Image (spheres, helix red, strand yellow):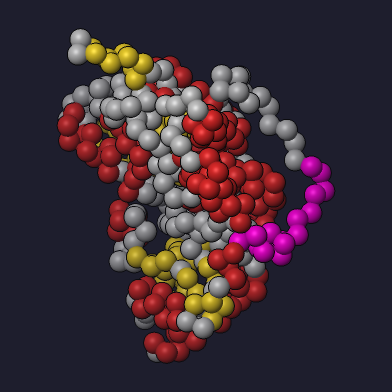
Amino acid sequence: MSAGSPVQPRPPAPAGARVDWARVRADFPLLRRTVHGKPLVYLDSANTGQKPAPVIEAVDAFYRRHNANVSRAVHALGTEATEAYEAARTALAGLVNVRGDELVLCSGTTFAINLVAYSWALPRLKAGDVILVTRMEHHANIVPWQLVAERTGAVVRPVDPTPDGALDLDTLYRAMTPEVKLLAVTHVSNVLGTVNPVREICREARRRGIATVVDGSQAVPHMTVDVAAIGCDFYAFTGHKMCGPTGTGALWGRREHLQAMPPFLGGGEMIREVSFDGTVFNDPPHRFEAGTPNIAGFAGLRAAVDYLQGVGMDAIHAREAELLAHLTDALDAAGGVRILGRAPEKAAVVSFLVDGAHAHDLATLLDLEGVAVRSGQHCAHPLLQFYGVAATCRASVAFYNTHEEIDAFVAALQKVRRLLA
């Protein structure tokens, strides 16, 4: 897909394709290490995904063979660096089915949402306007809107989930009142694992003239995402959660929005001409990419896209659904474990509490058994306040995990519970 080409239908996945998951797992060097003398069981992929060898090699190859800045030199290395950077844009655009000239490359979802907040929302919102968010949002999809609201007089209004962690769509739609100008919603909750019906939600918002921002950080790594079909105004996602390097990500925005938005940052690359009489800015998406980007990181992210597509996003989704079912059943069978979030549509994230044990104590002792889980509030303070808990442990699996690892985790959890009893 070239940068300005129209969106094309996604080709069907090969029928009946089988994946050798043991071979896939072998592509991830870090998973072979030990921690405290125990085999590593990595269950923190919602925090950051592990990197396959092709991604690591792509970053290394860039620095060894192609290192130069982008769009600033006509020599061979400069051309190669620019080609690598733009190849990442094209690959990412193909992955989520959008036009490349509508995709801003950036450091990740946090930067992407701040870009929308300051370049789109800040010039448009006024006192009395409402920014609607769900209570299951990551702080990156709450705090930027609060900062904009403080400067404009707008109000951030939350919509609560149901006790099982789903969104009550009737309640959400009733909250879409005429003063609502923007809806910010996560595609997949990083705490509950809830997969929200963003296509339906965006359709209802569009009917009411409400702009939509979708946080796709926990969706793009784990399932087929078709942004064109979702019908949102902006979609943000992060590279390091999808087996790519840290400090990479992207924001998709409708062309008419990007053309109307002023730059968020000023500097090199985002300009066409500078003089003391005035500056002419570059066209989108480049007007939002000031300064030297993480070129090597995007070379690695392009390799990550190729890797994920080589495995197959539908196969990844099915594999993780199997692992999630195993993990949920095993925790239920263990007894004394409360799982936060049991929505019917759920990704492979399980936040849990254990009777009589603090989440940080659990995570610390599990680490001594070689098991890596996250503990705390997961950058979602309002959500945990809603459920009346101070912190949880979170086990998040990816396609490179195994059923045996889940069994090892549950055995370690039972051992830790006995120590804390």
- Residue 131: image quadrant is top left
Q: List x then y, in percent, for residue 321.
A: 63, 57
* Along the line of sight, the residue nearer the viewer: 25 or 253: 25
Look at the image and tell me whether residue 86 can be seen: no
From the viewer's perspective, tell me whether residue 119 is left or right of residue 24.
left
Q: Residue 116 colored magenta?
A: no
Q: List x then y, in percent, for residue 211.
A: 39, 26
Residue at the image position 50 percent from the left and 28 percent from the top: 75
Look at the image and tell me whether residue 20 can be seen: yes
In this rendering, the count of numbered labels is 0
Depicted 300 relative to depicted 341: above or below: above
* Along the line of sight, the residue nearer the viewer: 152 or 402: 402
* Along the line of sight, the residue nearer the viewer: 117 or 40: 40
Please identify the dominant SS of the magenta region: loop
- Residue 34: image quadrant is bottom right
Residue at the image position 42 percent from the left and 81 percent from the top: 365
Q: Residue furthest top?
A: 277
Residue at the image position 41 percent from the left and 46 percent from the top: 247
What is the quadrant of the C terminus in the image?
bottom left
Q: List x then y, in percent, for residue 190.
A: 44, 53
What is the quadrant of the N terminus in the image?
top right
From the viewer's perspective, tell me whether residue 156 is left or right of residue 237.
left
Q: Residue furthest front?
A: 75
Q: Residue 24 colored magenta?
A: yes
From the viewer's perspective, tell me whether residue 289 is left or right of residue 220.
left
Residue at the image position 51 percent from the left and 59 percent from the top: 45
- Residue interval drawn in magenta: 14-28
